[in-house]
Amino acid sequence: MKRSEAARYARWSALAALLLAAITGGIYLHRQWIAHVERKKAPPPLTEDKERQSIGLTLSKGEGDRTIFTLRASKSTDFKGQDISLLEDVNVTVFGKLGDRHDVIHTQSCNYAKADGSIQCSGNVQLELESAADARRAQTQGGDKANVIHVETSGVTFEKTTGQAKTAQPVKFSFTNGEGEGVGAVYFSEEGRLRLDKVTRITLRPTEQQESGKKPATPATEVVLHGSSLEFGKQSKKVVLYGPATATTANEQQLTAGELTLFLDTQNRAQTLVAEPGSQGETPEVKSQGEKAHWKLRADLLRAELAPEGWVRTLEGEGNVRGSTENGEMQSESGNVEMWPGVNQAKLVTLRGNVRVNGQDRKTGNRRKLMTNALQLNFGGGRPGEPNPVQHAETLERGTVEWSDTAGAQSKLSANKLALDFGAKGKAQHMVATGNVEAQRDLEGRPTQSATAATGDVQLDAAGEWTQMTLHGTVHMKEGDRRADAQEAVFVRAADMAVLAGQAVARDESSETHATRITFHQGTGDIEAEGKVRSTDLGTNKTSIQLSPAPSNISADHMAANSKSGRALYTGHARLWQGPSVLEANSIELLRDSRVLNANGDVRAVFPQAAPDSKQGKEAAIWHVSSGTLTYWDLENRAHLEKSVVVKSADQRMRGPVLDLYFTHQGDGKAGSEGTAQINRAVSTGGVVVEQGDRRGTAERGVYTAEDNNFVLSGGTPTLYDASEGTTTGRELTFNNADDTIIVDSGNGTRTLTKHRVQR
């Protein structure tokens, strides 16, 4: 081997040895580093009171093939001489007896008692209450666990045998749109139920409308609930707040009850709030003490359906519902309120079962009362910050409304349906009554007034009092012994007036009046009738005119009467008939109390004449009368006629400016006895003309006597004109129609008898 080759080999050998040494050193250093790291990761050395430390611990409780809960700890340390283990990073997953829960309890460290399986956690504890379905959904779909109720507390003891977690420390919890707090709690893992034992508070907040990005029309206020204890069932979605319990809003609305129950929706948002008396026996009551409105509502049970945004959808009351405001009160067996969206204002209110609504005007003191079995009210609000006046109210079943005023008057209106419309400021304006309408009015010192009709409508003033009431369709009225019928009746309260129209008829015990329109002024007693007026006096009242035992009838275009004074004036083609007697005039006036009849203007009448003795039993002759005026006194059986008076029968006629007719009644001839009034005597003064066939007599005074059928002319220069016999005069002329004789008294004490044949 050459020297050069040997030297090259020696260099390569040294280099290989150096490389091997470096590799060997690197391996050694690497092993030393790994050992250092393992020593740092290894648990600390056991103290003298510890025996064994494990990496993790898992405990479970089952029932049959179902696991109720599982406890996992990342570390478990046993203590020497003690039956206690220290658990770290503890998680308890609760599945419940039905496997429908996925509640998780988490804390940093706990002591585990091996003997009874109880676990005591002195530090902070978090509970996440969640259903199994929500847990699976969150695992598969990802995202935040928005449907979880979070609970924070401390000092929790977990009993393995019962599955209950207990604490006496303060507790805080939160859910989607609310949070709460209390002191002391028990969690029942098998049922998924949480109970807070001492004074609790829950705050409900509106859910933000994040999807649309729009803010609500009016910010929904928070609702704060207080109670003595609370119980929450995650699976049942029910939170029970035991009383005395209250729910309060920032706008001074408060709900109090013996027990409040809050139901949550599938996303743990407040959905329904139920108020009950509970074991405290405190009747639920909601009231508002705001500046603009003071009201109160009570019921055996109150239920509010809540929107996710925080406003009330509906409010229901069941059992002994009572409400009151400054202007009145209401009651019913149940009630339902549908709210305008987003503004917590009533939209539709429905009351059912023995509904009573009482109102009173604070200025006048007048009272109103509505009674029905079902009532519905519509409100016209729905705008934030603005009033929410009622627009329409109607009874869904038969209803009655009553009014009473300070004067003591009572008014009542009933119908199958009552509908009331309100003005822009919520003042009642107009009421419509439909079906079997009944109206009644009571005034002090007067008989009750009542009326029935098919329909009706009522006008109301600003105080809610009726001003005008109109009834339609076959109206029947009654007041004491008086009755009335018409197709329409209008009552005006201020004028105390009633107007009947359309085939109007008014009746009492003794009379009846028909007309197109009849008006009653009930305060004064005035009565007016218009259009085809016809009155019938049945003759049962002895104060009426008695021309015949038959009913008395009178017709005219108009009538004005007064029920108090007994006066009745018929005008326009007035005509009266009773038995054979007929009277026509421009106007006929009847005075009930004095039993007087006055006829004026173009008076025409027909009266029967009493038959002479020789003709008794034969049909009575008829006298036709015309004059400017006629007055008849029934008590005197006398009629007084003036202005161009003419009375005539078939064969005789008497004319003069003034004439009196004296009547006797068929029968015994006594005034007022049964029978027809007949002319017994006629007396004319002031220049009389008597005509009998072609014979005519004149004098200052003329007297006709029906009993002997004689005319006696006297006064002035009585003169008898006869076409065949000439003229006869004397101080008194008497001629007998029966035997055609004339007696002339010459005035010198002698009487001259002249006999003529009267031509007929």
Image: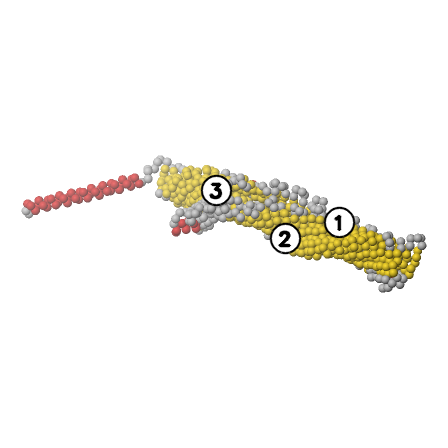
Q: Write down the quadrant of residue 21 in the picture.
A: top left
Q: Position of residue 714 (x, y in %)?
A: 87, 53
Residue lying farthest front? Answer: 726
Separation (CA) of disc 3 from disc 2? 47 Å
> Residue tagged by mark 2?
456
What residue does disc 3 label?
222
The residue drawn where x is 51% and y is 45% is: 344
> Which of label 3 and label 1 is nearer to you?
1
User: Callout 2: helix, strand or loop?
Assistant: strand
What amino acid type should be assigned to the residue bearing mark 1?
Gly
What's the amino acid at mark 3?
A: Glu
Q: Give residue 626's position: percent from left, percent from top.
A: 78, 56
Instruction: Please provide percent x and percent y for residue 587.
Output: 74, 53
* Image position of 252 (left or right of 214): right
State which tag comes first along the sequence, 3 or 2: 3
Q: Of the residues under marks 1 and 2, which one precedes in the sequence?
A: 2
| Amino acid type shown at disc 2 | Gly
The mark that comes first in sequence, 3 or 1, is: 3
For this orientation, the residue located farthest to the top is: 48
User: For the C terminus, which image quadrant?
Assistant: bottom right
- Specify few, some or many for label 1: CA neighbours under 10 Å numbering under 14, 14-19, or 20 or more: some
Label 3 and label 1: CA atoms lie apart by: 73 Å
Determine which residue is flagged by label 1: 566
Name the residue rendered at 55%, 44% in the picture. Answer: 276
- x and y, in percent, of residue 227 in the image: 51, 40
Q: Quadrant of residue 282?
A: top right
